Image: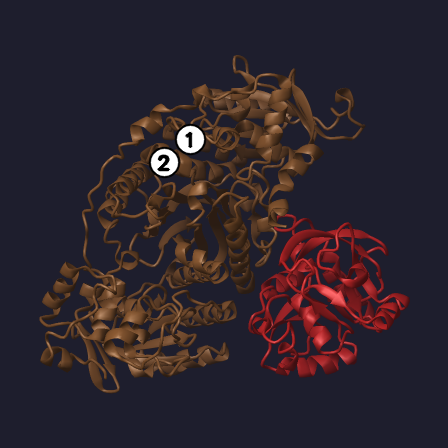
Chain colours: A red, B brown
């Protein structure tokens, strides 16, 4: 299975996302922000970083990159897309996911090993987890506070579209401790913490992030 | 009006503001002698920045020579002192480059930007060697934690280091946070970067090949970071020109990230003949150094430089320290490809000059010649001073005032209270308030990071080959004895690297001192450099480069002499790294090395008594080397679960940190004949705490005995001690037999709340 990883100017975790795809057993394909050709990949990861230096607003400029024109259409057509951190911000700016990410309530950038609960193990990116499973993966962001109006939050909760929630500490002031959400169809997932940094015991707090990537590959196999 | 070479000849006695630019009368006369005429204002600008202490090392050079003269025999050094950064061979065709630099004064004036551009500058040094930057570290020093100005400076500096490094995508894997009153008016911001490349990809700063082009690329040149420009612009040269501008540079990490990717691509594509970053002294430095190291000649069309501010004068353009710029030497045939790759990354690039064999660096401004100098005289043949130095009159009194008269805790309860006080001392307390603002995960190769002894990254994902790095310095030891203090810094850094399981290979340093014009400071500097050079020779690891920062003082009072030493080690497989957290119940805790009654300059004397006096702990580099061999062998042969160096705060601090990291308690005791206070808090060197599985005990202790390294069993990991000591079942405790028991939660609370409380 071929998984595209998009590099924008200022993307930082693109190598890590590609490595996670490979460790999970997939083939990673480098996609370039300035090229609208998705190279017939089976799924796409929008990695973390500071695309365009976070100028204007996180993800606000990346949303207009040529690759996003193709990606938005493809995602609406069912292509699996995972946006991590800055990628989550880009998905919100692109209106593939509702809500927005705001400055951490602590006003500090925060890097920590974060405990999460998987709230929805039905999406293409979370199906290898158990419903309610607790995991620890790195979190690192300066603008990770998830906000949306109450109606939207109620809708996300009611439809089971909150895929992960912060446990023990809410590190950034996210409404209702939301760490990640999905679209209605379950192919588009946005997540503030970084599963791609938890795919090897040696370099992460464990391998709790790996199932995000194996879930995808298994979902693709099942669908094919 | 532009001051051209023709003017300089015609108007020979025009008065020039050399003193305001920091040049001494005899230095100005020497420039006139070199040129055979008065310099133009642009030439004066170039000489003044390049002959500054910062660029020319004019006060330190005679002492720094020792690093070359006393260089140990080693095959590891691929590029030595003098280039942008040293390069060492770590095996398998990999080369690693690393360096530490200071950005002290800018960070005091403008904490965020000062610290941010400190990171940016050292990253470009590493990049200009042809390496991909892979990690940063930040040794920081502040005034007392409870001082009002520390609350101004510290959050800004930490945010600046984090803001720049995080946005660049470089993990921050370690550093130091130290508090001492001497840094109150002069905090120290040192920044280290490490990068890696294949041997064949090493690049040097030289302009080779007549007819090759000089390409300036990256950010546009602006009016930021111009030293002394107010004098140049408003008083003598150009009335009505730009007004005073800030002398602190402003960083843009996003531009630097693009610059890194663009640079690595043009290097990989083989489009670069020579490369240089633009840091201190900007275009003056880059052009004169490139020309001086190459064919010896270069011509520059200065009006082609892309500007942020079109009103800048040529003198300002030559001196500007705008960030995120690089200079490359490119053949005419490769130019289009070079520009195309820059365009891919949206980095602006422009040809500003050409290499020739004239032996001169010439600069034109709208077809008028404003600079015509021999480049070596600018870049490499600056003044050299033999500054007078002498041992301070107070040194003997300081050394005579030892810590023996200080009241020591004796009862178990006093010892327990001292332990809780010490783990909450600002210098020993948890630094996670700082390090949690840094991304330690990006790039996915961080194997160890703060609070571990050393930072460790994987270089080769196939083989697991990696490097470990530590930076250390105890300025109090250096004040008591600068020669020994520098060696103690070296020893501690070395020990931190071997504790991780890596083999030390090379050294970088950042020598932070007061004014070189003060003979007593100069003595400290001379002693420290000699101590460091002698120490590196004895340990067999060469100094590959570094940085000198003088004039760190408030009024007439200098900071503690602070020779920060960074040691780099190599590990053939990062899978065998030794962390500091001990393992499960039953594992045995050993103390390696000898413990003496050594409290002069210790954290206990400083924190509990506010005392500094006596002679620092004895240095024994042969012992450090032996300890290192044992720790590396223990790692290689799978005999160690954990290891932790013993330094600031003594064994007590080491045990507490290991227990907190593991979340598991232990029972400990002092070796026979050692009084509990000395056991817990002495700062004797050459020691480490190691944790050995029972199955490996015999093999490990026999190895230590055969090599004659003292090894004392001082404890055992035990998670079940709580109930016996009156705590609830499951409570993890650290028990010091026959003395006292303390819950890990109480230690953790004391240890971790210090910085957040002070900064809230």
Label 1 Cα crowd, 10 Å radius (few <14 / some 14-19 / many 20+): many
Q: Where is residue B656 in the image (x, y as percent from the top left)?
A: 61, 32
Say if residue B460 shows up in the picture. Answer: no
Point out the residue furthest to the right here. A158
* Depicted A178 relative to depicted B478: above or below: below
Identify the mark at residue B612; answer none if there is no mark: 1
Please determine if labels 1 and 2 lie on a single subunit.
yes
- Image quadrant of residue A85? bottom right
Q: Position of residue B479 (x, y in %)?
A: 36, 36
* Depicted B395 relative to depicted B185: above or below: above
Q: Which chain carries label 2?
A: B
Q: What element carries label 1?
A: loop
Label 2 Cα crowd, 10 Å radius (few <14 / some 14-19 / many 20+): many
Report how many numbered discs are placed on residues in the image. 2
Asked whether B274 or B41 is in front, the reply is B41
Point out the residue furthest to the bottom here. B367
Q: Mark 1 lies on which chain?
A: B
Asked whether A43 or B319 is in front, the reply is B319
Q: Where is residue B201 in the image (x, y as percent from the top left)?
A: 39, 62
Q: Residue visible at 45% across and 62% down?
A: B117
- The span from disc 1 to disc 2 (Cα, nearest Å) is 9 Å
B629 horizontally vs A57: left or right: left
Q: Name the residue under label 2.
A: B479
Is there a contact, CB below 8 Å, between mark 1 and mark 2?
Answer: yes
Q: Is mark 2 on a helix, strand or loop?
A: helix
A117 horizontally vs B227: left or right: right
Say if residue B533 shows up in the picture. Answer: yes
* Depicted B592 relative to depicted B361: above or below: above
Q: Residue visible at 57% across and 50% down?
A: B434
Quadrant for the N terminus of chain B, please: bottom left
Q: Position of residue B290 (x, y in %)?
A: 27, 68
Asked whether B142 or A103 is in front, the reply is B142
């Amino acid at each position: 299975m071929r998984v595209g990883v998009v590099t924008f100017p200022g993307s930082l975790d693109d190598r890590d996302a590609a490595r996670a795809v490979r460790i999970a057993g997939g083939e990673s394909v480098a996609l370039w922000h300035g090229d609208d050709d998705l190279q017939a990949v089976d799924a796409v990861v929008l990695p973390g970083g500071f695309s365009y230096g976070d100028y204007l607003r996180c993800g606000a400029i990346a949303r207009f990159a040529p690759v996003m024109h193709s990606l938005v259409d493809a995602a609406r057509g069912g292509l699996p897309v995972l946006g991590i951190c800055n990628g989550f911000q880009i998905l919100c700016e692109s209106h593939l996911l509702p809500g927005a990410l705001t400055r951490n309530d602590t006003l500090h950038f925060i890097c920590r090993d974060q405990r999460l609960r998987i709230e929805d193990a039905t999406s293409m990116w979370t199906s290898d987890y158990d419903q309610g499973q607790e995991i620890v993966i790195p979190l690192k962001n300066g603008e990770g506070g998830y906000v949306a109006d109450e109606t939207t939050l109620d809708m996300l909760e009611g439809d089971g579209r909150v895929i992960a929630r912060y446990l023990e500490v809410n590190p950034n002031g996210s409404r209702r401790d939301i760490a990640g959400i999905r679209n209605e169809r379950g192919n588009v997932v946005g997540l503030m913490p970084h599963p791609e940094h938890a795919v090897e015991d040696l370099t992460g707090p464990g391998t709790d992030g790996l199932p995000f990537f194996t879930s995808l590959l298994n979902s693709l196999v099942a669908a094919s | 009006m532009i001051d051209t070479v023709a003017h300089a000849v015609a108007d020979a006695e025009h008065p020039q503001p050399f003193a305001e630019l920091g040049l001494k009368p005899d230095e100005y006369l020497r420039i006139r002698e070199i040129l055979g005429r008065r310099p133009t204002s642009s030439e004066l600008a170039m000489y003044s920045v390049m002959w500054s202490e910062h660029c020319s090392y004019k006060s330190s050079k005679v002492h720094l020579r020792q690093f070359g003269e006393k260089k140990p025999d080693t095959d590891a050094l691929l590029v030595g002192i003098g280039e942008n950064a040293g390069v060492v061979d770590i095996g398998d065709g990999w080369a690693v480059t690393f360096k530490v630099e200071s950005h002290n004064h800018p960070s005091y004036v403008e904490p965020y930007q000062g610290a941010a551009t400190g990171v940016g500058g050292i990253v470009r040094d590493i990049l200009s060697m042809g390496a991909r930057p892979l990690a940063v570290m930040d040794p920081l020093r502040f005034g007392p934690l409870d001082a009002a100005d520390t609350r101004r400076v510290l959050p800004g500096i930490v945010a600046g280091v984090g803001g720049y490094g995080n946005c660049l995508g470089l993990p921050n894997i370690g550093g130091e946070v130290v508090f001492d009153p001497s840094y109150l008016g002069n905090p120290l911001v040192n920044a280290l970067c490490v990068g890696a490349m294949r041997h064949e990809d090493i690049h040097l700063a030289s302009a080779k090949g007549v007819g090759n082009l000089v390409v300036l690329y990256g950010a546009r040149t602006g009016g930021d970071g111009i030293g002394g420009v107010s004098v140049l612009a408003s008083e003598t040269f150009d009335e009505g020109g730009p007004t005073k501008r800030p002398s602190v540079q402003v960083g843009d990490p996003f531009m630097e990230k693009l610059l890194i990717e663009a640079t690595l691509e043009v290097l990989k594509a083989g489009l670069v003949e020579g490369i240089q970053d633009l840091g201190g002294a900007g275009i003056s430095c880059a052009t004169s150094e490139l020309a001086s190291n190459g064919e010896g000649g270069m011509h520059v069309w200065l009006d082609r430089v892309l500007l942020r501010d079109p009103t800048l004068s040529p003198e300002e353009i030559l001196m500007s320290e705008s960030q995120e710029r690089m200079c490359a030497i490119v053949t005419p045939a490769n130019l289009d490809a070079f520009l195309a790759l820059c365009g891919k990354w949206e980095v602006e690039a422009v040809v500003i000059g050409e290499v020739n064999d004239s032996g001169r660096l010439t600069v034109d401004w709208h077809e008028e010649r404003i600079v015509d100098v021999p480049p070596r005289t600018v870049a490499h043949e600056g003044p050299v001073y033999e500054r007078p130095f002498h041992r301070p009159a107070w040194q003997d009194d300081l050394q005579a005032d030892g810590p023996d008269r200080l009241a020591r805790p004796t009862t178990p309860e006093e010892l327990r209270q001292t332990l809780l006080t010490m783990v909450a001392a600002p210098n020993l307390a948890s630094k996670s308030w700082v390090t949690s603002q840094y991304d330690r995960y990006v790039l996915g190769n961080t194997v160890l990071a703060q609070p571990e002894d050393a930072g460790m990254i994987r270089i080769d994902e196939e083989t697991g080959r990696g490097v470990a790095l530590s930076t250390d310095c105890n300025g109090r030891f250096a004040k008591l004895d600068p020669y020994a203090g520098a060696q103690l810094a070296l020893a501690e850094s070395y020990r931190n690297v071997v504790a991780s399981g890596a083999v030390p290979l090379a050294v970088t340093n950042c020598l932070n001192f007061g004014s070189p014009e003060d003979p007593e400071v100069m003595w400290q500097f001379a002693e420290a450099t000699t101590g460091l050079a002698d120490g590196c020779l004895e340990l067999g690891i060469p100094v590959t480069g570094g940085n000198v920062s003088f004039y760190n003082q408030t009024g007439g009072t200098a900071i503690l002499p602070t020779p920060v030493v960074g040691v780099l080690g190599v590990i053939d497989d990062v899978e065998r790294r030794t962390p500091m957290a001990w393992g499960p119940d039953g594992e045995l805790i050993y103390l390696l090395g000898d413990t003496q009654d050594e409290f002069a300059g210790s954290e206990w004397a400083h924190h509990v008594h506010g005392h500094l006096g006596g002679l620092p702990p004895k240095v024994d580099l042969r012992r450090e080397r032996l300890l290192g061999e044992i720790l590396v062998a223990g790692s290689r042969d799978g005999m160690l679960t954990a290891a932790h160096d013993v330094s600031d705060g003594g064994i007590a601090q080491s045990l507490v940190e290991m227990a907190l990291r593991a979340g598991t308690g232990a029972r400990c005791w002092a070796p026979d004949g050692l009084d509990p206070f000395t056991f817990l808090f002495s700062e004797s060197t050459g020691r480490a705490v190691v944790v050995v599985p029972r199955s490996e005990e015999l093999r490990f202790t026999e190895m230590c005995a055969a090599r004659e390294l003292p090894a004392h069993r001082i404890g055992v990991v035990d998670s079940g001690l709580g109930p016996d000591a009156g705590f609830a079942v499951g409570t993890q405790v650290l028990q010091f037999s026959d003395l006292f028991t303390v819950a890990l939660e109480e230690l953790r609370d004391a240890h971790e709340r210090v910085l957040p409380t002070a900064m809230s």
